[in-house]
Structures are given as structure tokens and as C-alpha cells.
Image (spheres, rainbow, N blue to C red):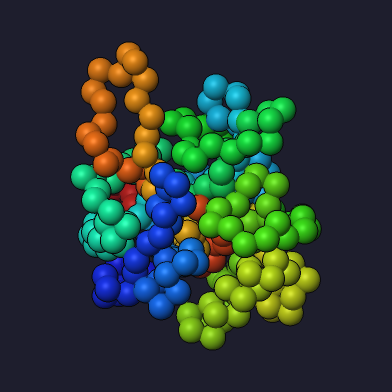
């Protein structure tokens, strides 16, 4: 479902310690998979990338979203998270003004993940026609790790039904069997969407309380939450589109 185009009452959230996970009102204790549309500005989904300080790895796609739609999206997410308790504000980490959909960061030598993406990234980019096989399923969760396979479904030249086909994809994601399915053979898989392409990102959403350091000059207000958009899959709709000419 698209949070920007539904009634806010259809979303709620549940708490895991100091983390709030967005869910559907009909299934309040399970993370709901939402989708957002935009233009790709950078992508590293086929292989891991390092954080700018080199202390962790993740997979990520940065997308220029539709402003008006995103504002409504955030308003619905705010209302959903507030159902688990008072929230004074939501913070969104961006990259060059774009929204970042990513896996959890895993730090070298620890295997432990961070609850928030690092401020800056090193992007590798690139795209090809082959994708690696995913690792075995790690069970039910509301986020992925860099070791998880993030499928990019190529729907540029095939009709994609946003009811039946999307439902089928969500079931395959739950079973962690996208690659070996007839679904992927019918549409095809892609490594990384090219810059400028139009995509739909399928993701979950959670919020967590940021930690203020002692030298932080502007501490976050109480009950502020940082929003994390956890990527699960991407639908590739177009080739890379060139920006309009000045002439």
C-alpha cells in the first residue's frame, strides 16, 4: 500500500523497546510493506557499500520522491507512529535532498547492525542483467541486512498489475524465493536501477530515538524519532531518463 494514498486510519504501529514499527491496522503486530515512487539518484543494491567513515556496510538506493505525495506520506506515518505514544517530531535522513531506502548497517567484525543509516555514503552505482542468488531466509523481521538479496524486478517492457502481481511479489518476499520463481522469469531481474530511472521502492518503516552526544549543540527535543525506510524490493519502470535540455 502507498501511505500517501490511503486513509490514515489504515495504519498503526507497535513498539519494540524504543523502536516503533509501522503496521497495518488489520495486522497491528506485523510490519507492513509500503511502496513509494520516484527517480533514482544513486543505487547500490546488487553489492554492499561502505559508510563514509568505513566502519560499516549496507545496501541502499537514493530516490528523488514526488514532494506533495511525500508530504502526505510523512503525515500518515506520523499519525501511525503516534498511536504507540506521544511523538514531538519525525526526522528523515536524506542524501543530497533525496530519500534513502536501505538495509541495516552491519559493522565489520561484530555482525551487529545500526538502527540508522550513516549521514554520507560512497556509491558504486552501475547496472547489469544478472543478479546473485539470495541467502537463506533469516525469519520474520522488519528490516534487511547487507547479506540479504534485494530483488530489482524489471517491469519496463511487461505489464505489471499493481494488484495481483504486487500481491504475488509480497508473498514471494515473505517466502524468500523471488529468484527461483516463475514471477522473476516472467519479468526479469536487474542489478541496480540506472540513475534517472523511475522506480517503485517496496519498504517497511520504523522510527527510533536518536542519541545526542555530549558536544551536540542542538539536542533533539524529547520524543523525537528518526525515520528509517527499510528496502525490500524495487520495481524498475523506465530506463534512465535524461534531464530536460536548457535549449
Q: Specify the quadrant that holds the N terminus.
A: bottom left
Residue 186, percent across and down? 69, 78
Q: Is residue 177 visible?
A: yes
Image check: 18 left or right of 189?
left
Q: Is residue 43 above or below residue 4?
A: above
Numbered label tally:
0
Image check: 95 left or right of 235?
left
Residue at the far bottom in the pictured view: 164
Q: Is residue 49 visible?
A: no
Residue 63, percent across and down? 43, 51
Residue lying at 69% horizontally and 71% vertically, measured from the top left? 175
Residue lying at 30% horizontally and 67% vertically, measured from the top left? 4
Q: Is residue 217 above or below residue 164?
A: above
Residue lying at 67% horizontally and 60% vertically, measured from the top left? 139
Residue at the far top in the pictured view: 215
Residue 159, percent across and down? 55, 82
Residue 221, percent across and down? 22, 34
Residue lying at 54% horizontally and 86% vertically, measured from the top left? 164
- The front one of 161 and 128 is 161
- The front one of 195 and 211 is 211
Amino acid at each position: 500500500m502507498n501511505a500517501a494514498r490511503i486513509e490514515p486510519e489504515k495504519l498503526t504501529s507497535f513498539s519494540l523497546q524504543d523502536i516503533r514499527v509501522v503496521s497495518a491496522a488489520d495486522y497491528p503486530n506485523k510490519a507492513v510493506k509500503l511502496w513509494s515512487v520516484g527517480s533514482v539518484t544513486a543505487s547500490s543494491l546488487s553489492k554492499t557499500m561502505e559508510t563514509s567513515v568505513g566502519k560499516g556496510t549496507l545496501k541502499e538506493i537514493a530516490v528523488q520522491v514526488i514532494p506533495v505525495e511525500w508530504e502526505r506520506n510523512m503525515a500518515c506515518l506520523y499519525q501511525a507512529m503516534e498511536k504507540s505514544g506521544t511523538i514531538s517530531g519525525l526526522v528523515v535522513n536524506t542524501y543530497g535532498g533525496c530519500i534513502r531506502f536501505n538495509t541495516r548497517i552491519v559493522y565489520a567484525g561484530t555482525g551487529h547492525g545500526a538502527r540508522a543509516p550513516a549521514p554520507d555514503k560512497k556509491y558504486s552505482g552501475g547496472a547489469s542483467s544478472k543478479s546473485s542468488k539470495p541467502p537463506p531466509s533469516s525469519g520474520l523481521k522488519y528490516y534487511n541486512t547487507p547479506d540479504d538479496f534485494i530483488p530489482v524486478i524489471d517491469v519496463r517492457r511487461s505489464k505489471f498489475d499493481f494488484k495481483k502481481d504486487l500481491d504475488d511479489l509480497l508473498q514471494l518476499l515473505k517466502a524468500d524465493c523471488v529468484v527461483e520463481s516463475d514471477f522473476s522469469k516472467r519479468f526479469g531481474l536487474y542489478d541496480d536501477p540506472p540513475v534517472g530511472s523511475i522506480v517503485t521502492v517496496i519498504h517497511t518503516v520504523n522510527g527510533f530515538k536518536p542519541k545526542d552526544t555530549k558536544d551536540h549543540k542542538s539536542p533533539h527535543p524529547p520524543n523525537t524519532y528518526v525515520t528509517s525506510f527499510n528496502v525490500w524490493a524495487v520495481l524498475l519502470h523506465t530506463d534512465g531518463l535524461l534531464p530536460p535540455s536548457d535549449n
